Amino acid sequence: MTKLLPFINEQFDWPIWRMEIDSLSGILFVELRNSEEKKVAFGAVDLHNGQIFFRDATTPERWLTGVEAAYNGVLLVHNYLSGTGPVHKGLIAIDGTSGKTIWSNYTLAFDHLSVNGPVVYNAQIQPKKLFLADVKTGEILRAYQPVLDTALDNGISVPQMMPAHFLHNLQLTETESYGNTIHYMEHNYYRIVSLHTFFQQKLKQHLYIINIDGAIVYQDLLNSHIQKLQPEAFVVHKNKLIYLKDRSTLIVLNL
């Protein structure tokens, strides 16, 4: 029986708050937040070969900033209008391989990502008018055309929620799930399961990968110091299983 091993196993210095995958370049971006020091940094990993492009790219705004989107090798980040609300302000573009800022515009706001690039608008003008922007330069290319600028499919698959008794179908009868549901996905003849257990007053989150013969070919303890049930623990992108361990370690497996 062949056991699966991580293709990427990278621990970052700060907790990972968000991941964004650029389906065109195959770069996975992470948003890292240090709540104690009120600092934010960004990292980038090549999903094709596991290369770490950068781990600690920053912008002039060190805290009120976050990932917006990624397209064609460029990470778009935004600032926040204030520290007490969710309203975004401005756009900053970071090169996906160097981590350097390539342009910024503090009047533009991001609306959504299309197959032709980011769709933006001038936040100072009402009513809102949408435009297609060049992600490499920040230049406005033309007015947004819904027929041409359709939404971009990021190629990410997420697990579905299943009742906890479904574990008996997976031959995980020795594992008692805490809670009424588990997260489950089938991909390339593998069955992937994420569940919680509660033992000796400790809540933990686990990951199992089961092959077509019903054997466990991979398992990991994702979180061991949590206070409540966690959301979906993994995603699959182009035959790669992606998940976080203890919030700060990025792990990728080839399925």
Image (cartoon, grey):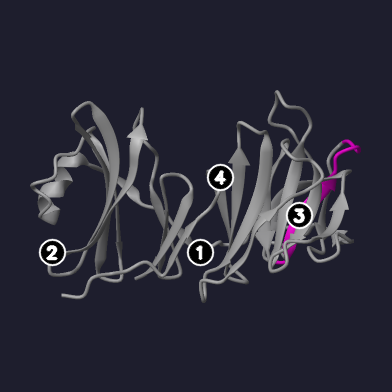
Amino acid carrying label 4: it is: Trp
Of 225 and 173, nearer the camera is 225
> Measured along the vertical axis of the image, is residue 94 above or below residue 175?
below
Secondary structure beneath dot 1 equals loop
Find the distance from the CA under tag 4 to the CA under tag 3: 31 Å
Q: Which mark is residue 155?
A: 1
Amino acid carrying label 2: it is: Gly
> Measured along the vertical axis of the image, is residue 61 above or below residue 147?
above
Find the distance from the CA under tag 1 to the CA under tag 3: 19 Å
> Measured along the vertical axis of the image, is residue 127 above or below residue 150?
above
Amino acid carrying label 3: it is: Val
The residue under the point 62% across, 71% down is 24
The residue under the point 24% across, 32% down is 179
The answer to whether mark 1 and mark 3 are in CB contact below 8 A is no
Q: Residue furthest top?
A: 84
The residue range painted magenta reads 116-126
Amino acid carrying label 1: it is: Gly
Of 69 and 252, nearer the camera is 252
Q: Which mark is residue 214?
A: 2
Select label 3 or label 2 by which is in front.
Answer: 2
Find the distance from the CA under tag 3 to the CA under tag 2: 46 Å
The residue under the point 74% across, 50% down is 58
The residue under the point 78% across, 61% down is 100
Q: Provide residue 192's location: percent of width, then percent of height.
A: 28, 57
Which comes sooner in the sequence, label 4 or label 3?
4
